[in-house]
Image (cartoon, rainbow, N blue to C red):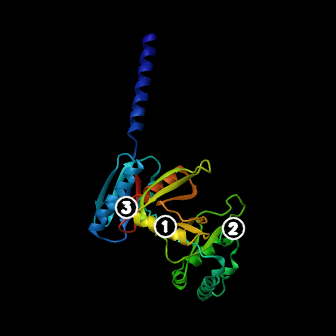
């Protein structure tokens, strides 16, 4: 009897070891990316950018190879985050700092928006009927949730952006009042020339927001030329608001209280640690040479 018990325990241990080894080997994800254009030189540069971003994100078992003239095949250990990694390799992370125009200068821009809206859909409500004054002290209007899709479609229309040459109209990336039953988004009219762009960034990293527990921020170090432009622009616009825009959405628009020398800035939003880490990685990495998209994902 004792010998049988020993044999049974040994078998169970062997089976547990086998299961552990099999689960340790894990599965792999194969992701196929496609560039918008067929160009071997652009493809090779994209391979290098994709590999660099994924290596820095810490993925395991990474392999990145070109396929044909406009595809890239990426293989990595599957850890259930293929969607996030797809966003990471395809994102442009277009960053701009723009001065917010005061509300008293909005009327000509809004009139142009309404004119384009009437020309495209005479029966639809004009933009000015869809927005309301904001409860915040910032130069911003609010877009109630029921009108958000309509407003988003209006300002995304290329004819609108072409007509409004004297300013850029963008929505906030996050709701102004996320705790409300129907959160609203902010609508901003910004100067047409950005103060800074992503090309002015020397490096970026992330850290906890010292004033908001559980929230993370992105810290950026500017190039020498970027630092000079930033100090000059903030000094010339004291009292106005500076919109920090990411991928055509306003992250925040703090008031400029004084000139900001030293070449350092902070992007403060409602970022989780993972979101802040990914954004800092994107801002600190090379730009993709061409637009790229995920066309297939397969888990082996």
Q: Nearer the viewer, residue 113 or 64?
A: 113
Residue matched to label 3: 286
Q: Secondary structure at mark 1?
A: helix
Q: Position of residue 214 (x, y in %)?
A: 60, 48
Is the residue 144 above or below the residue 177 in the image?
below
Q: Secondary structure at mark 3?
A: loop
Give the distance between the C-alpha atoms of the residues marked 3 and 1, in whole angstroms. 22 Å
Residue matched to label 2: 137
Can residue 134 be seen in the rendering of this structure? yes
Is the residue 39 above or below the residue 122 in the image?
above
* Category of crowding for the residue at label 3, using alpha-carbon neighbours closer than 10 angstroms: few (below 14), some (14–19), many (at least 20): some
Q: Nearer the viewer, residue 154 or 270?
A: 270
The tag on residue 298 is none
Which mark sits nearer the N-terminus, 2 or 3? 2
Number of on-image labels:
3
Q: Position of residue 243 (x, y in %)?
A: 56, 68
Can residue 198 be seen in the rendering of this structure? no
Position of 2 with respect to 234 (left or right) is: left
Is the residue 8 above or below the residue 205 in the image?
above
Which mark sits nearer the N-terminus, 3 or 1? 1
Q: Marks 1 and 3: in contact by CB < 8 Å? A: no
The tag on residue 230 is 1
Q: Nearer the viewer, residue 210 or 94?
A: 210
Give the distance between the C-alpha atoms of the residues marked 2 and 3, in whole angstroms. 37 Å
Q: Position of residue 201 (x, y in %)?
A: 43, 62
Give the distance between the C-alpha atoms of the residues marked 2 and 1, in whole angstroms. 24 Å
Q: Marks 1 and 2: in contact by CB < 8 Å? A: no
Position of 9 with respect to 98 (left or right) is: left
Q: Position of residue 220 (x, y in %)?
A: 47, 58
């Amino acid at each position: 009897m004792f010998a049988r018990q020993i044999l049974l325990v040994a078998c169970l241990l062997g089976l547990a070891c086998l299961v552990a080894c099999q689960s340790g080997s894990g599965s792999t994800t194969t992701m196929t990316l496609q560039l918008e254009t067929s160009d071997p030189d652009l493809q090779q540069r994209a391979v290098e950018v994709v590999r660099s971003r994924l290596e820095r994100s810490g993925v395991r078992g990474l392999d990145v190879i070109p396929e044909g003239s406009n595809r890239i095949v990426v293989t990595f250990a599957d850890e259930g985050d293929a969607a996030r990694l797809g966003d990471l390799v395809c994102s442009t992370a277009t960053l701009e700092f723009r001065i917010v125009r005061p509300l008293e200068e909005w009327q000509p821009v809004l009139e142009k928006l309404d004119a384009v809206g009437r020309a495209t859909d005479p029966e639809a409500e004009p933009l000015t009927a869809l927005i309301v004054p904001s409860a915040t002290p910032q130069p911003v209007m609010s877009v109630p949730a029921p009108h958000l899709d309509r407003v988003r479609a209006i300002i995304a229309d290329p004819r609108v952006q072409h007509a409004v040459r004297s300013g850029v109209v963008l929505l906030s990336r996050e709701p102004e009042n996320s705790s409300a039953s129907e959160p609203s988004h902010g609508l901003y009219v910004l100067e047409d020339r950005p103060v800074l762009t992503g090309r002015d960034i020397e490096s970026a990293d992330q850290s906890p927001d010292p004033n908001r527990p559980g929230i993370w921020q992105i810290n950026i170090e500017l190039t020498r030329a970027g630092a000079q432009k930033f100090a000059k622009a903030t000094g010339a616009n004291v009292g106005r608001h500076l919109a920090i825009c990411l991928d055509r959405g306003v992250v925040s628009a703090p008031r400029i209280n004084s000139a900001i020398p030293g070449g350092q800035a902070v992007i403060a939003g409602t970022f989780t640690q993972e979101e802040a880490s990914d954004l800092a990685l994107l801002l600190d990495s090379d730009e993709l040479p061409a637009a790229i998209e995920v066309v297939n994902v397969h888990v082996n």
